[in-house]
């Protein structure tokens, strides 16, 4: 006589199994959101530095005009020319009052000086009015990496952070002006860039980055 085989089929899942599945989905979702936020932050910084680099190139094309803005040679003389640059602004930037801003709300000011070092110069000051915390650190890092592209042309890059406990600053020089105590932009390591930018993680009244070119 053949024995009958009884097959038992399970319908549905236990609560523990469902909770396990939900936990896995939750972890994957968090990881996906984090990766998406990181990618978006990188894209945003790429846009900012791309716009800023293009703006610098356009302003430097008219270097002969900016020399005429400061006829004197005495140290300390300077003139802000931001209001004269509307026709050079990237499409994502905008003007508000006497100032110009990028698409993240960071302020850009352009100044011509009689002397930066030994020659007339044009300075681009980027004030981080539209970012806080880690976003400022990431943009500062991108700013230094971008500056490496100008190592053969730039005079100086510097950062400034005004805090309640004191001021912090860092600087590096272009290839023609570095050496000795003057750090070379082209030689900056990622660790040194991170060290220069880490103070931006702390809250401060004023945070800026500047690039200076001889005219």
Image: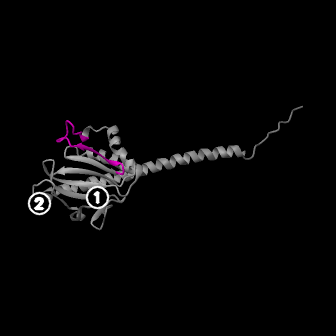
Figure quadrant of residue 60:
bottom left
Q: Secondary structure at mark 1?
A: strand
Q: Which mark is residue 68?
A: 2
Instruction: Establish if 151 lies above or below 106.
Output: above
Residue 12: image x %, image y %? 73, 47
Q: Position of residue 163 (x, y in %)?
A: 35, 51
**Residue at the spot x=51%, y=48% of the render?**
32
Q: Is residue 98 left or right of residue 112?
A: right
| Residue contact at pointers 2 and 1, CB within 8 angstroms | no
Q: Is residue 87 left or right of residue 164?
A: left
Where in the figure is residue 193, as x and y percent of width and height?
A: 32, 41
Q: Count neighbours of disc 2 (C-alpha within 10 A) and say few if under 14, some if 14 to 19, many if 20 or more.
A: few
In reply to whether residue 182 is colored magenta, the answer given is: yes
- Could you tell me which quadrant the N terminus lies in? top right
Residue at 36 percent of width and 51 percent of height: 164
N-terminal of the two: label 2 or label 1?
2
**Residue 151: quadrant of the picture:** top left
Q: Is residue 51 visible?
A: no
Disc number for residue 156: none
What stretch of residues is rendered in magenta? 163-185
Q: Which residue is mark 1?
A: 108
Q: Is residue 3 left or right of residue 26?
A: right
Residue 69 is inside the magenta segment: no
- Residue 100 x %, y %: 29, 62
Q: Residue furthest right?
A: 1
Q: Quadrant of residue 28?
A: top right
Residue at image coords 28%, 64%: 99
- Residue that protrudes farthest toward the top in the picture: 1
Question: Can the viewer see residue 116?
Answer: yes
Closest to the observer: 48 or 109? Answer: 109
């Amino acid at each position: 006589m053949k024995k009958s085989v009884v097959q038992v089929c399970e319908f549905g899942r236990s609560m523990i199994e469902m909770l396990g599945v939900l936990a896995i989905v939750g972890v994957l979702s968090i990881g996906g959101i984090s990766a998406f936020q990181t990618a978006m932050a990188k894209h945003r910084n790429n846009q900012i530095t791309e716009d800023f680099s293009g703006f610098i190139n356009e302003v430097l094309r008219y270097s002969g005009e900016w020399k005429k803005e400061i006829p004197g040679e005495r140290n300390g003389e300077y003139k802000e020319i931001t209001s004269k640059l509307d026709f050079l602004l990237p499409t994502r930037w905008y003007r508000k009052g006497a100032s110009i801003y990028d698409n993240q709300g960071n302020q850009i000011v352009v100044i011509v000086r009689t002397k930066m070092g030994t020659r007339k110069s044009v300075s681009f000051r980027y004030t981080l009015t539209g970012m806080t915390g880690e976003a400022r650190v990431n943009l500062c890092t991108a700013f230094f990496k971008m500056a490496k592209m100008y190592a053969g042309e730039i005079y100086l890059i510097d950062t400034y952070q005004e805090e309640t406990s004191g001021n912090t600053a860092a600087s590096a020089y272009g290839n023609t002006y570095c050496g000795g105590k003057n750090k070379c932009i082209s030689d900056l390591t990622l660790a040194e860039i991170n060290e220069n930018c880490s103070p931006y993680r702390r809250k401060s009244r004023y945070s800026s980055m500047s690039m200076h070119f001889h005219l």
